[in-house]
Image (cartoon, rainbow, N blue to C red):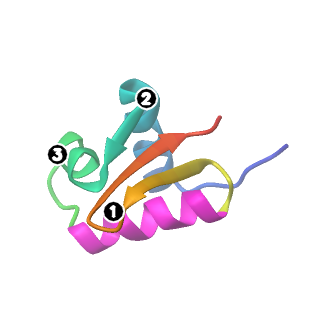
């Protein structure tokens, strides 16, 4: 299956591949400067919608896991 993801989404996926699973804050910590909380959340949500990431946990503590 061919997934179309942006360069920014790819960076987020690389972090999840490296860590296995990570919270939004952990993804932010692993990214270079210039990323804000809302941007990271948007990319994680897009990746989840595309079926590349699964979100687990409570609303206050969501962990994201790569599915590919």
Q: Is residue 44 left or right of residue 23?
A: right
Instruction: For marks 3 and 1, give the CA distance.
Output: 11 Å
Q: Quadrant of residue 11?
A: top left
Q: Nearer the viewer, residue 68 or 4?
A: 68
Residue that appears at 29% across and 55% down? 24
Q: Is residue 40 magenta?
A: yes
Question: Range of the magenta residues?
Answer: 37-49
Pointer 2: what residue?
Answer: 20
- Main secondary-structure element of the magenta-colored stretch: helix
Residue 35 location (% of width, % of height) = 22, 61
Contact flag, marks 1 and 2 (Cβ < 8 Å): no
Instruction: For marks 3 and 2, give the CA distance.
Output: 15 Å
Pointer 1: what residue?
Answer: 40
Label 2 neighbourhood size at 10 Å, few (<14), some (14-19), many (20+)? few
Residue that appears at 34% across and 68% down? 59
Residue 21 location (% of width, % of height) = 40, 36
In front: mark 1 or mark 2? 2
Q: Is residue 12 magenta?
A: no
Q: Nearer the viewer, residue 58 or 55?
A: 58
Instruction: Tell me the SS state at disc 3.
Output: helix
Instruction: For marks 1 and 2, give the CA distance.
Output: 17 Å
Contact flag, marks 3 and 2 (Cβ < 8 Å): no
- Which numbered disc covers residue 27? none
> In terms of sequence position, does the residue under pointer 1 or pointer 2 come before the other?
2
Pointer 3: what residue?
Answer: 29
Residue that appears at 19% across and 46% down? 32
Label 1 neighbourhood size at 10 Å, few (<14), some (14-19), many (20+)? some
Residue 6 location (% of width, % of height) = 55, 57
Seen in the picture, residue 5 relative to 10 is either above or below; the reply is below
Q: Quadrant of residue 40?
A: bottom left
In the rendered image, the quadrant that contains the N terminus is top right
Instruction: Tell me the SS state at disc 2.
Output: loop
């Amino acid at each position: 299956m061919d997934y179309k993801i942006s360069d920014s989404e790819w960076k987020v996926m690389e972090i999840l591949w490296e860590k296995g699973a990570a919270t939004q804050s952990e993804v932010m910590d692993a990214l270079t400067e210039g990323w804000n909380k809302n941007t990271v959340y948007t990319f994680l949500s897009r990746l989840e919608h595309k079926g590349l990431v699964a979100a687990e946990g409570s609303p206050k503590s969501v962990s994201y896991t790569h599915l590919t």
